[in-house]
Image (tube, helix red, strand yellow):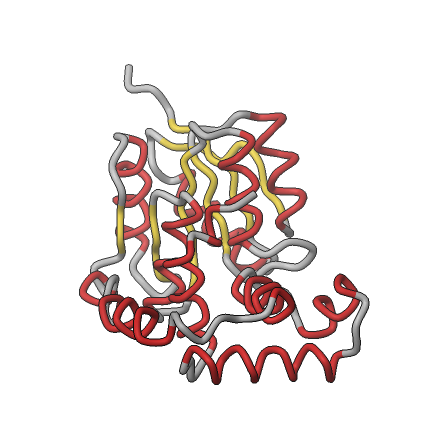
Amino acid sequence: MTDVLRIVIAEDHETVRQGLKMIVDHEEDMEVVGEAGDGRTAIELAKQLHPDIVLMDISMPELNGLRAAATLKRMMPEMKIITLTRHTDDAYMQELFQAGVSGYVLKQSSPSELTKAVRTVAAGEHYLDPAVASKVFLGFGETKRLRGEKASQALTSREQEVLHDIALGFSNKEIAEKMDISVKTVESHKASSMHKLDLKSRRDIVRYAILRGWMQES
């Protein structure tokens, strides 16, 4: 008899979560053993249940999917995580794979894409939704070149800290509270650091963070 894959689903929208559960439980070799509506609950369930795979939505309250996935991988390196999202932005993909996820599936893809991802990841391989596969490293080389050209324009420790936290998904308000400074000062540090590095968007900030290895830090 084929071993049944034990799966935890982390998705804050109950309707979507139930739909995912139906897809998974319909397969003879898969079963949902736990459900979570936020990142912190997903971590606790994974610790308690030791599932084979966690299906993790990126956008969740309490703790977003990226930070929850990174935390899980630090605590349980053997844990397999597949992220679910509507985003096709390559910056999201690079961010998540750097955090240690094994699969990236678009919510708008077919149910068969999800089950294929589960089986692929369970077999020890990585899975990237074919709808975005061609975008994985688009522009990555250009960011490396940019970083080299701007390396002489050193960031202050405060600018680096602000940029670091933005890349990890913190809001300006959260950063201000964390650093005990005003939101306006955070915005000033962000603008200054982006100018020095010639970064135009959050996508550029994420790429820079990946190159610096920030996304793998504890």
Quadrant, the N terminus: top left
64 vs 25: above or below: below
Q: Which residue shows up at 65% across the image and 68% down it?
A: 158
5 and 122: which is toward the camera: 122
Residue farthest to the top, as pictured: 1
Query: In the displayed image of the protein, which residue is found farthest to the left?
Result: 134
Q: Position of residue 130 (x, y in %)?
A: 21, 59
Q: Position of residue 176 (x, y in %)?
A: 75, 70
Would you say 14 lies left or right of 80 here? Answer: right
Q: Quadrant of residue 148?
A: bottom left
Q: Residue at x 62, y 49 (%)?
A: 39
Between residues 214 and 73, which one lies in front from this camera angle? 214
Q: Residue at x 52, y 35 (%)?
A: 74
Q: Quadrant of residue 100?
A: top left
161 on left or right of 113: right
Front one among 80 and 14: 80
Relative to 57, is 161 above or below?
Answer: below
Compared with 194, 65 (above or below) is: above
Residue 58 x/y as whole percent: 50, 58
Q: Position of residue 132 (x, y in %)?
A: 25, 65
Residue at 40 percent across and 69 percent down: it is: 87
Query: Quadrant of the image for the C terminus?
Result: top right
Q: Is residue 177 left or right of residue 118?
A: right
Residue 159 versus residue 200 in the image, above or below? above
